[in-house]
Image: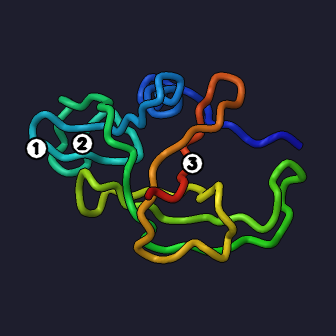
Amino acid sequence: MPRKLPALNADNRAFWQGGEQGELRIHHCASCSRFFHPPAPLCPHCASFEVTPTAVSGKGKVLSYTINHQAWNPELEVPYVVAIIELVEQPGLQFVSNVVGIPVTDVHIEMPVRVSFLNIEDVWLPLFEKDQ
């Protein structure tokens, strides 16, 4: 069973396809100057429609994580880490992703990470690796 991919639309296309240019694109509001995720046509903080996907550094830290040992999908190697990542651009700007490239036992809270991308079809999944 292949990995389920998101349905692309006008609101989320920049997020899911920014990896083609090596960019993590997060929606930013011109009215209140805040980033937000998931992508949406209006800002959840001030309800402005002046939002646009903006490239961010791709750097952050692990806020929380779990190590999954269940083989839900034969394409996923177990164990693997599912983490809540907070990006450095703004406190509270976070989303769920995987931490890859290191043993699962080396992942820890506050660990600095940087984005990497896994390309499947027309989607670039943002994953995170340990940042030096």
Side of 9 where 98 appears, left or right: right
Determine crowd level at label 2: few under 14, some 14-19, many 20+ residues with C-alpha closer than 10 A: many
Asked where in the image residue 48 lies, by quadrant, the reply is top left
Q: 131 or 45, which is in the foreground?
A: 131
Please determine whether, in this image, residue 8 is positioned above or below residue 34.
Answer: above
Q: Is residue 35 above or below residue 7?
A: below
Query: Which type of secondary structure does the marked residue at label 2 adopt?
Result: loop
* Labelled pair 2, 1 in contact (Cβ < 8 Å): yes
Image check: 51 left or right of 113? Answer: left
Q: Which mark is residue 114?
A: none
Look at 72% across and 64% down and name the residue there: 80
Which amino acid type is shown beneath numbered disc 1? Cys
57 or 126: which is nearer to us? 57
- Residue 43, labelled with which disc? 2
Closest to the camera, between mark 1 and mark 3, is 3
The chosen color scheme is rainbow
Of the 4 image quadrants, the one containing the C terminus is: bottom left
- Residue 127's disc is 3
* Rendered image quadrant of residue 8: top right
Q: Earlier in the sequence, mark 2 or mark 1?
A: 1
Q: Secondary structure at mark 1?
A: loop
Earlier in the chain: of badge 3 and badge 2, it is 2
Q: Position of residue 58 (x, y in %)?
A: 39, 45
- In this figure, which residue is indicated by the disc labeled 1? 32
State the SS at label 3.
strand
Question: Against 129, is 103 above or below?
Answer: below
**Amino acid at circle 2:** Cys
What amino acid type is highlighted by mark number 3? Leu
Name which of mark 1 and mark 3 comes first in the sequence: 1
Q: CA distance from mark 3 to mark 2?
A: 25 Å
**Of tags 2 and 1, which is closer to the observer?**
1
